[in-house]
Amino acid sequence: MDGISALDPAAQEAIDWEVRLRSGEVSQEERDAFTAWRHADPAHEEAWTRLQQRLGRLSALQGTSGAAVRKALDEPSRNRRRLVKAGAGVAAAVLAGVGTRQLVSAWALDADYHNGHAAPQRIALDGDIPVTAGAAARVYAGERAQGDIYLAAGQIATDAGRRGYQPLVVTTRDGMVRAERARVSVDVLRLHTVVAVQGGDAVLTVHQGRRLRVPDGSAWSLSAGQIARMPETSADIFSWTRGTLVVLDRAVPDVVETLGRYFGGYIRFPQAALSRRVSGVFPLNDVEGALQQLAESLGFSLKLYGNVLAVATQA
């Protein structure tokens, strides 16, 4: 997510100007100062242009997810990839501007299922595999998955077991989860994949080959060939299916990224906040309130500008 990456000083100043200009209370002197800032250094103009491109791209993608791109994603799989790659309406402009192959790959636009809603969705994947898909989840299934399910983005929760205790295998870029009787929650985050296990054991495998059988009720992190126990319980992690994010001593970028799936716009927290850890219970059905809660818990205040921009600043 753009909002949690490290920003250079020009990019930070560009965001600050975006916030001030959107406030609706800008004097002519401030507008003149903004113009002077843009002309003072080529890096300023470049940072401003880059920010507007990012905001515009987010807006365009949000629009097409409900129209052209969503229509393509809802088509039968044999037609979906053709529609996505060909593009239609605004989607065509987005694909042309970013590059079709890069966009399809980076956003997993050819996934078999994409949840574009804020609320979790119950779905049945190929092979009659029922799962709950969280906001922004992108899932590949069947022949195109590595295992039964490949989770490219977002979060899913599986049901307990399958007929004949046939194992269910969920793969992400960080590793693989194999469960027989257990249900699992799998969450692909930027820094790692979070796995929670309920109702039985599961086997976790990372790409370098390490395997670990993990017990009922536990939560785990998979990243960079490592499997690490997390302080949360599986009940904490599964709370997302009921509209609540529960974290214990969690890196702030994890929380910002998760809330960003529900907010949908650009979120900016200062680097001083992103290097910290946080514990809390955040409502996913009130993402603006959750962002305010996160900011206040870290000693910051938050300004919201519609559903496009959320900026945390020193209180």
Image: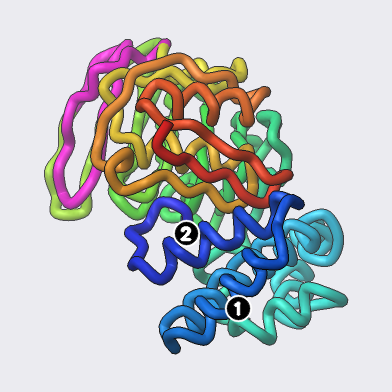
Taking 98 as reference, is 11 left or right?
left
Res 202 visible: no
Label 1 sits on residue? 35
Which of the two labelled residues, at mark 1 and mark 2, occupies the earlier sequence position? 2
Give 313 or 29, whichever is nearer the viewer: 29
What residue is pinned by disc 2? 2
- How many marks the image carries: the answer is 2
Q: CA distance from mark 1 to mark 2?
A: 25 Å
Q: Are marks 1 and 2 in contact (CB under 8 Å)?
A: no
**Magenta-span inclusion, residue 218:** yes
Whole-percent x and y of residue 13?
A: 45, 64
Q: Could you tell me the amino acid type at mark 2?
A: Asp
| 270 lies above or below 160 | below
Q: Nearer the viewer, residue 150 or 169?
A: 150
Q: Residues within 10 Å of mark 2 (few under 14, many from 20)?
A: some
Left or right position of 293 against 277? right
Residue 14 is a magenta residue: no
Q: What is the span of residues highlighted in magenta in the rendered image?
A: 213-235
Instruction: Where is residue 15? Give x, y as percent.
Output: 52, 60
Crowd tier of the residue under label 1, counting other residues whose Cα lies within 10 Å: few below 14, some 14–19, many 20 or above: few
Residue 203: quarter of image: top left
Quarter of the view holding residue 277: top left
- Secondary structure under badge 1? helix
Q: Which mark is residue 295?
A: none
Which color scheme did the rendering employ for the protein? rainbow
SS at badge 2: helix
Image location (x, y in percent) of residue 223:
23, 46
Up-down relation of residue 113 to residue 134 (above or below)? below
